[in-house]
């Protein structure tokens, strides 16, 4: 048992799945980065690029789902391989959702980009976006590396996002009270922050799935 | 209740130490799958249960192997009766060159039954239990050798259960069968475990996971892990088990 060698076909197909997963993850990270750029400086071409990127993410996710299903049907993985592929199907659905949320954020930014949103709110959103980018990178990596400790960190990382989200809501509320002109744009601003917060939730969900994949226990429920 | 109990079992063929300190229990009315690479000792363990290894002169056994609490290797054990109580189905179907009816009746006759009505009733019951009655009821007097491989294997199972065994040992019973015949045998195993305790050797992981309640992984004559099947195939305790069932085995 010195050389650990699954079948060549099995390993090649698993490697291809991992490559496709990396591509999805990189695309989601890029979309989130574009969202931050759009917040700082609205650009119609970036908006379109995010929408197109979200659609691409959809197609690539569906393709990878097909690949995973075919892999399970033909290679019949067991134990850690089975748990990995089963979890992969769930994780990529979270990644796909990140794309949708980025597209929704881009739409919200388009709706309010000409409105003089208070600097403090914009700065907090940009900070939130950067922080989410770090969380996404971490979540994609912990899943691939079966990193239990870092997967657990994601839940704590999310506290920072919740804090920023609450702060943004407070700012929006006080701005609304003090500036009636801002009122029509409240919904978009709140949604924008809410969508960002939900992207962070997706990173947490990927971390939770990673924990389940390794321990077969739901963090915070079975543990 | 445990039907079979092995405690610190060691077996040898001449100087070759085959099974090494095996302790394993098989509960009543369950299916235990034995898995592991060729030469790991799983068939030797299986054949120790009905003393088939006794047919090899150099075979030696140490430790304890119990059937219903009775020592299988006791001097008082009637080996013919043991093999009635512990039936066996082999890799390749091996019907006798006799009629379908006589294949099933054979075991009853050699155990002293001469009541033809009882024998006819038992043959029918056994063929029904082996899920082959409907296929052969109109040709019981025809040669068993004319049946398909899958039908022959189910006939062999009928022949085994005609003797009212407590345990059925199966040594890769589907390895020579097509997928449909395999499915029929697997369905049959699910039915048979209501009345019998079954120990099956298989190289097919999917088959082990489909038919068994418990699975034991053997490697180099050692029992590496014995667990509930769903646990062993999803989250095995032992790294060696994980490596074997995921094909990382070099």
Image: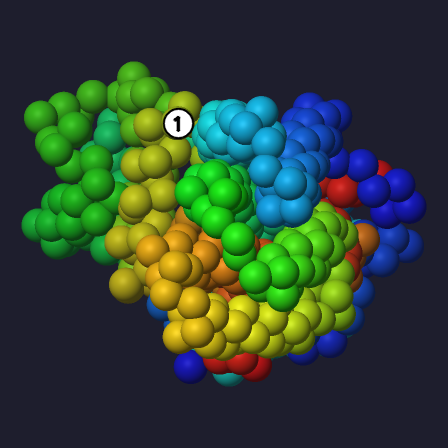
Q: Which of A177/B37 is in front?
A: A177
State how the image is colored.
rainbow
Q: Is residue A136 left or right of residue A83?
A: right
Q: Nearer the viewer, residue B180 or B17?
A: B180
| Number of on-image labels | 1
Residue occupied by mark 1: B179
Residue A25 position, x and y percent, is 65, 40
Q: Position of residue A160 (x, y in %)?
A: 65, 73
Instruction: From the top left corner, tell me how far across and down residue A145 is, in percent.
Output: 76, 52
Please report the residue visible at 12 percent of the width from the left and 54 percent of the height from the top.
Answer: B118
| Residue B104 x/y as whole percent | 27, 41
Position of the N terminus of chain B by quadrant: bottom left
Q: Which residue lies at the image location 39% right of the left edge and 27% below the top edge?
A: B179
Examine the rendering and report whether any part of residue A22 can be seen. Answer: yes
Q: Give the secondary structure at mark 1.
A: helix
Residue at the spot x=63%, y=65% of the render? A120
Q: Out of A86 and A126, give the one closest to the viewer.
A: A126
Residue A96 appears anywhere in the view: no
């Amino acid at each position: 048992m010195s050389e650990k060698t699954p079948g060549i076909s099995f390993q090649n197909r698993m490697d291809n799945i991992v490559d496709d997963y990396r591509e999805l993850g990189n695309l989601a990270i890029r979309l989130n980065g574009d969202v931050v750029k759009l917040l700082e400086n609205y650009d119609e071409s970036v908006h379109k690029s995010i929408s197109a990127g979200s659609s691409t993410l959809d197609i690539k996710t569906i393709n990878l789902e097909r690949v995973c299903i075919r892999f399970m049907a033909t290679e019949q993985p067991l134990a850690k391989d089975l748990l990995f592929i089963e979890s992969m199907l769930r994780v990529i659905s979270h990644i796909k959702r990140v794309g949708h949320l980025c597209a929704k954020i881009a739409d919200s930014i388009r709706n309010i980009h000409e409105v003089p949103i208070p600097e403090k709110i914009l700065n907090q959103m940009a900070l939130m976006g950067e922080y989410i980018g770090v969380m996404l990178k971490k979540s994609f990596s912990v899943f691939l590396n079966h990193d239990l400790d870092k997967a657990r960190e994601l839940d704590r990382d999310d506290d920072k996002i919740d804090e920023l989200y609450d702060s943004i809501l407070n700012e929006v509320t006080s701005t609304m009270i003090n500036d009636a002109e801002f009122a029509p744009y409240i919904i978009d601003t709140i949604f924008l922050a809410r969508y960002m917060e939900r992207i962070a939730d997706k990173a947490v969900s990927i971390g939770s799935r990673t924990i389940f994949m390794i321990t077969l226990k739901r963090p915070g429920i079975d543990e | 209740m445990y039907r079979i109990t092995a405690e610190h079992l060691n077996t040898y063929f001449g100087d070759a130490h085959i099974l090494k300190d095996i302790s394993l229990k098989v509960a009543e009315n369950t299916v235990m799958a034995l898995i592991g690479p060729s030469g790991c000792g799983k068939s030797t363990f299986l054949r120790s249960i009905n003393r088939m290894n006794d047919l090899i002169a150099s075979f030696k056994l140490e430790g304890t192997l119990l059937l219903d609490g009775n020592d299988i290797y006791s001097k008082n054990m009637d080996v013919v009766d043991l093999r009635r109580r512990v039936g066996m189905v082999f890799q390749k179907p091996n019907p006798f060159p006799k009629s379908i009816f006589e294949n099933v009746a054979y075991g009853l006759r050699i155990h002293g039954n001469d009541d033809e009505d009882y024998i006819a009733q038992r043959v029918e019951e056994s063929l029904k239990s082996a899920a082959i009655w409907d296929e052969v009821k109109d040709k019981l007097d025809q040669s068993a050798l004319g049946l398909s491989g899958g039908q022959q294997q189910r006939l062999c199972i009928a022949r085994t259960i005609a003797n009212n065994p407590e345990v059925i040992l199966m040594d890769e019973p589907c390895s020579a069968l097509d997928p449909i015949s395999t499915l029929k045998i697997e369905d049959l195993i699910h039915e048979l475990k209501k009345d019998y305790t079954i120990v099956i050797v298989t190289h097919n992981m999917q088959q082990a996971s489909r038919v068994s309640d418990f699975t034991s992984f053997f490697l180099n004559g050692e029992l590496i892990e014995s667990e509930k099947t769903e646990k062993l195939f999803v989250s095995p305790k032992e790294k060696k088990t994980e490596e074997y069932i995921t094909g990382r085995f070099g």
